[in-house]
Image: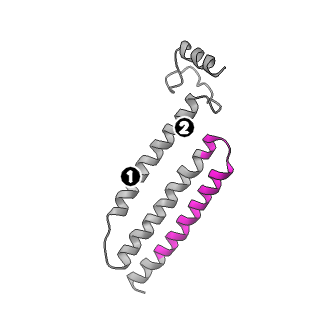
């Protein structure tokens, strides 16, 4: 078999794997109720799914004789920005107290950004009530 045929089969396999991962992410997004659990499905699974689709595009461009760097740049941008945005969304949910807060660490108060002055906590409680 030639390299072109192998690249075509590899691109088809990457498309199937990527589509499967994306379907799992969509089902998880629709099924979960809590924002923190909803956040897990698309960020973890979607990154791998989109990465596989971009890999299929890269393999296809190789199979037809061209070269493409755009997919590599998109993958690098995706793998850098997806965890950062997920972290910010999770921190917003924790600070709004819309989910259960993590347990307090023993003898250490520098691990989190949840330590806020008591006045801020009282102001938020009076705004909700």
Compared to 3, does 37 lie above or below?
Answer: above
The verdict on residue 31 being magenta is yes
Q: Is residue 89 magenta?
A: no
Tell me if 89 is positioned left or right of 129 in this view: left
Task: Please report the bounds of the magenta region as a residue range.
Answer: 10-38
Disc marking residue 62? none
Q: Which residue is mark 2?
A: 90
Instruction: Tell me residue 35's x, y (percent).
Output: 62, 41
In this view, 102 is above or below 21:
above
> In terms of image quadrants, where is residue 25?
bottom right
Query: Residue 84 at x, y = what percent?
Result: 45, 42
- Residue labelled with disc 1: 77
Kindly state the secondary structure of the residue where label 1 is placed: helix
Q: Is residue 106 left or right of residue 113?
A: right
Compared to residue 87, the image places residue 124 above or below, namely above
CB contact under 8 Å: marks 1 and 2: no
Residue 14 % position (x, y): 50, 69
Instruction: Count neighbours of disc 1 (C-alpha within 10 A) and say few if under 14, some if 14 to 19, many if 20 or more.
Output: few
In whole angstroms, how far apart are the C-alphas of marks 1 and 2? Answer: 20 Å
């Amino acid at each position: 078999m030639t390299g072109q045929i192998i690249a075509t089969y590899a691109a088809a396999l990457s498309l199937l794997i990527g589509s499967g991962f994306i379907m799992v992410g969509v089902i998880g997004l629709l099924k979960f109720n809590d924002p923190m659990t909803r956040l897990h499905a698309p960020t973890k699974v979607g990154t791998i799914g989109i990465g596989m689709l971009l890999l299929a595009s890269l393999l296809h461009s190789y199979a037809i004789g061209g070269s493409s760097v755009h997919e590599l740049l998109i993958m690098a941008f995706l793998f850098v920005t997806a965890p950062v945005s997920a972290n910010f969304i999770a921190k917003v949910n924790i600070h709004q107290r819309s989910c259960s807060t993590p347990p307090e660490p023993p003898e250490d108060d520098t691990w989190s950004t949840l330590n806020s002055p008591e006045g801020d906590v009282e102001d938020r409680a009076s705004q909700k009530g």
